[in-house]
Amino acid sequence: MQSLTNRAKPVDRRPMTFAEKLYLPAIAKGMGITLKHLFKKKATVNFPEETRPFSPVFRGLHILNRDEEGRERCTACGLCAVACPAEAITMEAAERLPGEEHLYREEKYAARYEINMLRCIFCGFCEEACPKQAVYMSETFAPANYQRKGFIYGKDDMLIPHPQKQIKENNQ
Amino acid sequence: MEFTIDWYFLIEKLLLISAVLGISLVVAMYSTWGERKVAAWIQDRRGPNRAGPFGLLQPLADGGKLFFKEEIIPAEANRFLFILGPSLAMFTACLTSAVIPWGDSLTIGGREVSLQIADINIGVLWIMAVVGMGVYGIMIGGWASNNKFSLLAACRGASQVISYELPMGLALIALFMLSGSLSLKDIVEQQRDGLWFVVLQPIGFLIFLICAFAECNRTPFDLPEAENELNGGYHLEYSSMKLGFYLFAEYINMFISSVLMATLYFGGYAFPYMDSLGIDGNLLTVLGIGALFIKTLFFIFLFMWVRWTIPRFRYDQLMKLGWKVLIPLALLNMLITGAVVLFRQNGFNF
C-alpha cells in the first residue's frame, strides 16, 4: 500500500530475540527516560502566584473607556451590539441632561450597558465596530462565579475608573 | 523457683516497639507524599505543593479527609469479615518489622540496648510467614464485599502472592547457603565483615526484588487493584479509614520490603569501612541507622520509579513470568550456589 506521507515507518514484526525477551534492558532504558524527566523543567505554571504571559493581541474582558477629561465615550449607538455575533451586548440609551457635560462626552449616552460574559466569544468585533473608541478588550478573563447572573457585567463592572477621582482617592 | 521480671528490659522493648511502629507509620505516610511527588516529576508536573512548604502537610490533609468520609458497609456484605479485612492487612503489615535489626546496639547507662525487637533465629521465616498471611487481608476484604469485581481482584491477589512467594523463598534459600543463618542480625554482621550479599547473589537479588514488587501489589504487578479493569480492585466497596488502612498497609509493606532488601542484600546498617573509621559505640550505631535509612529510601524510590515507568502485566504474562521464568531461574541459582558452597568447603577436591 502506498503511504500517505514519507514519514511512515513499517512495523517490525520479527519475533523477539533472546535479548529482547529478557525485558530487563528495555526496562532499564525506560527507567532511564523517566529519570531524565525527573529533572526536566516542569511544564506546570503555579497559577495564582504566576500567570502565563498573554500575547499582545489577547482579547479578554471588555473595558468601557473614558476620554482625557474623564467623560464616558460611549454614545449608545448600538453598533457593537449589531456587530456582536453572539448577541451578548444589551444597552439602553438615555439623553444627556444639561449639567451632565462633565459626565458624558456626547448628547446621548448608555444608561445601561450589559455584556453577558457567558455568551461572549471574545471575538473583538465590538472593539472594531465602535466608532468612538469606547469599548476595549483588556488582558484579564472572566473569573469564576457561583451564579449565571454573576457573569452579566454591567457598567460598574466595565467602566474604567475616573482618572481625576482615582487620583483624589489615592491621595486620601 | 525464683521468678523476677527485668523491668528495664520490658520498658526498653516497649519503647523500641513504639518507636519502630511510629517510624513505620510516618515513613508510610510520607511515602504517599513521595509517591505523588515522584509521579509528578516523572510526568513533568510539580506535585502537591499547596499544603505547607513543598506540600509536606499533604499526607495529614489526606488522612483528615479520609477520617471525615462517610463510612459505608454494603448491605449484602459480611460485616465481621468486612471489618476484619483491612484490620488484618494493617496488622500483618506492622508485624514484619519485629525481626528487623534497625541498628547495632546502643549503650545507655551501662546497659547494652539492642535495636532489634526480637532477634529470633528464624527471622526470615517469620517474615515469609507474616507476608504470606498478608494476603488474607486482601482475600477476606474482597470476599466480604460481596462484589464480583472485589472477589475477582482478591483471587488475583491470592494467586499472585502465592506464585511469587515460591521464587522468593528459593532465592532466599540460596542466600542462606552463604550466610548459614536465618537470623537477620547474623546476616547483617556477616556483611559487615565481608562482601554485601548482592555481590555474591546478583540473580538472587533480582528475583527477590521482582517478587517483592509482586508481594506488595505494586506496578507492574498491581493486578489486584487494576483501576481500569476492576473499578479499583479488592477495596472497591471500602470507604473512609478502612480504605485508608488498605492503602496505608500497602505503603508499610513497601517500607518493610525496602528495609528487608537493604538488610538481606545491601548490608543493612553496615556500611563500607565502618570499622576502620576509628569511632565506635553509640555514634557508630547512629551512623549505621542512617545508612540503613538511606538504603531503604533508595529502594522506596525505586518502587515509585518503577511504578511510573512500567505498564501493568497481563494476567497470563504475570503467571508465566512467575512459574516459567522466575522459579526455574531461582532453582538454577540455588543449585549453582549450593555447588559453589560445596566446592569451597571441600577445598575444591572430592
Image (tube, rainbow, N blue to C red):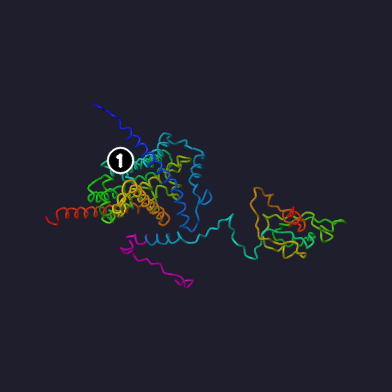
Image point (70%, 52%), residue name? A152
Where's residue B124, x and y in %? 28, 44
Whether residue B235 is situated above or below residue A137 in the rendered picture: above
Residue B243 lies in magenta, yes or no? Answer: no
Foreground residue among B183 and A130: B183
Q: Residue at x 76, y 57 (%)?
A: A162
Provide the residue span drawn in magenta: A1-27
Q: Nearer the viewer, residue A169 or A111?
A: A169
Task: From the image, tell me which residue sits under label 1.
Answer: B112
Q: Element under label 1?
A: strand
Q: Is residue B248 above or below residue B345?
A: above
Q: Quadrant of residue B313?
A: bottom left
Residue B24: quarter of image: top left
What kind of residue is marked 1? Glu
**The furthest residue to the left:** B350
Tell me the chief SS of the magenta region.
loop
Q: Is residue B46 left or right of residue B259?
A: right
